[in-house]
Amino acid sequence: MKSSKPYLVRALYEWILDNDTTPYILVDTGIDQVLVPPGIANDGKVVLNLAPAAIEDLEMTNEHVSFSARFNGVAENIYCPIASLLAIYARENGEGMMFPAEESDDTPAESDADSSDPAKPKGPTLKVIK
């Protein structure tokens, strides 16, 4: 089954614009193929403004988000594989969605033997705080 992430990103982008707010994405620059200008990332992450007035040639596919934007007056092409997207949200109120970080191709995945360990949680857990 295909990932729902690119569909959710496109839907949330439209929803954010329909509410007259500014769409921002949070990108993990440590993922292969991410293309952003040098020096704009902070701790391996960068927040990018996707407002139609701030960018040109926006393309949102099932594989990537790409566009052209100006940084310090210089037009730059931006390319973000879907795997690199960590969040999409409205700048004004923070409404949007975060996505779990995906492992890059050079990060070893957990083996099946490790996942059968009963001491390890099998996925996200919730904790009630009073």
Image (spheres, helix red, strand yellow):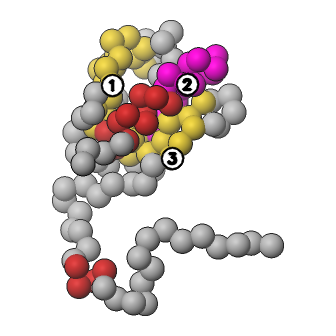
> Which disc number belongs to residue 48?
none
Picture residue at 35% right of the left edge, 36% below the top = 6
* Residue 22 within the magenta-colored segment of the rendering: yes
Amino acid carrying label 2: it is: Trp
* Residue 60 within the magenta-colored segment of the rendering: no
x and y percentages locating residue 32 in the rendered image = 23, 45
Distance between mark 2 and mark 3 Cα atoms: 15 Å
Any part of residue 35 in sight: no
Q: Which secondary structure lies at badge 3?
A: strand
**What residue range appears in magenta?**
13-26
**Horizontally, is 84 left or right of 52 in the view?**
left
Q: Quadrant of residue 76?
A: top left
Any part of residue 5 in sight: yes
Q: Which secondary structure lies at badge 2?
A: helix
Distance between mark 1 and mark 3 Cα atoms: 17 Å
Amino acid carrying label 1: it is: Met
x and y percentages locating residue 128 in the rendered image = 70, 72
> Which disc number belongs to residue 98?
3
Residue beneath label 1, please?
A: 60
| Looking at the image, residue 113 lies above or below residue 97 | below
Picture residue at 64% right of the left edge, 20% below the top = 19
Mark 2 neighbour class, 10 Å CA radius: few under 14, some 14 to 19, many 20 or more: some
Residue beneath label 2, please?
A: 15
Q: Which secondary structure lies at badge 1?
A: strand
x and y percentages locating residue 17 in the rendered image = 56, 19
Sequence-wise first label, 2 or 3: 2
